[in-house]
Amino acid sequence: MASKGKVGIVGSGFIGRGWAMLFASVGYEVKLFDVESSKIDDALADIQMQLNKLEETGYLRGHLSAAEQFSLISKCDTLKQCVSDSIHVQECVFENVDLKRKVFQEMDAFASNDVVLCSSTSCFPASSFSEDLVHKSQVIVGHPVNPPYYVPLVEVVPAPWTDPSVVIRTKNLMTDIGQRPVVLNKEVPGFAVNRVQYALLDECWRMVRDGIMSVEDIDTSMKEGLGLRYAFIGPLETCHLNADGMLDYCNRYGQGINKVSETFGPNPRMEGELAEKVNEEICKISPVEKLAERRCWREARLTALAHLKKILKEQDEAQ
């Protein structure tokens, strides 16, 4: 089985494992590295289990078998082995800008002039950890939505000095592995997905703080309300469809939205007694000791939803 090229994964946690599975699903040779060697062994065992389970349930991505995909993923003993000769390296270390700066400096020493050095960071712009690198024009952010194997969106965010060809290559690679890349034209803290998500979380915490709703009812409002339509259309198209177009929506509801938004006030802090209260209520719904079981439940449903969306998309395209 011929490889489509070598891809390095730095960091073997949940995100790194998801990336490894995605790249292997279409035939890339994946080299997995972690500073703690034993973590790679654990990751490989988990990846094999996930691939086999996906194959059994009929939700395995790509055209290769689970065994063929797993055979493409292997352990690296050193960062140099991971980076050298790779066409793309996906960094997946902890969300700490100093750590990312250190890792990218180390990768820079082994990088060719052709490799793309891509970070999975969820909120740090590439400019915050790549400014002094020799290969800084090859650095870009490819932020996935967790868990990446089950949620296809990837935010592609260049630094001011990222070569435009790197943006194109990264977008094309993400498309090749079955993801849905979106490109940010400029760096902004938190990128796009998390800025929207943080606005949502701020209001959820505000309603708990002010005694407006319980944690359970807030989550129900999303999963049985907004979440259902947002699975197929975004908030802007929702506005467009809920009136005679966007301009009509603005004329009808714009002033009311502005008036409500002005009542929000300062964002609540996610700490102290309020954090304890939210934690107590959410643990009744999803106990900490059963998080692994709950994640499996979540991923099974995300997989089923992705499968449904694929079927509906094919039906739309056939019409």
Image (cartoon, grey):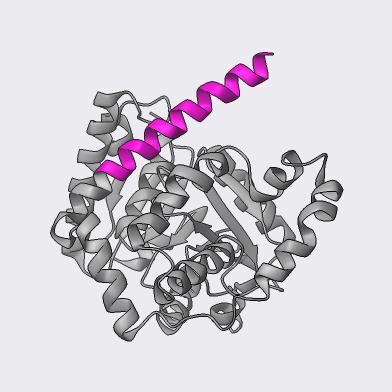
Quarter the C terminus occupies:
top right
Point out residue 3 in the picture as x, y percentages from the top left corner.
43, 36
Identify the magenta region. 297-319
Which residue lies at the image location 20% right of the left edge and 39% below the top edge?
49
* 253 to the left or right of 41: right
Query: As rendered, which of 93 and 214 lies closer to the eye?
Result: 214
Q: Which of 313 and 227 is in front in this view?
A: 227
| Relative vertical location of residue 245 with respect to residue 32 in this rendering, above or below | above
User: Does residue 306 appear in this view?
Assistant: yes
Q: In the image, is 165 to the left or to the right of 4?
A: right
Depicted 185 relative to depicted 129: above or below: above
Where residue 74 appears, as percent x and y from the top left, is: 28, 48
Residue 16 position within the rendered picture, expressed as x and y whole percent measured from the top left: 36, 56
Residue 301 sits inside the magenta stretch: yes
Query: Farthest residue toward the top?
Result: 319
Residue 128 percent across, percent down from the top left: 57, 81
- Image quadrant holding the N terminus, namely top left
Q: Which of 37 and 313 is in front in this view?
A: 313
Left or right: residue 290 versus residue 116 is left
Q: In which quarter of the image is residue 279?
A: bottom left
Residue sitting at x 43%, y 84%: 98
Label count reads 0
Dominant secondary structure of the magenta stretch? helix
Spot the residue most to the front.
212
Q: Looking at the image, which is closer to me, 56 or 103?
A: 56
Residue at image point 61% right, 73% down: 136
Up/down of 70 relative to 280, above or below: above
Identified at 37% across, 69% down, the residue is 93
The stretch drawn in magenta includes residue 162 = no
Say whether residue 40 is left or right of residue 25: left
Asked if 21 appears above or below 254 in the picture, the reply is above
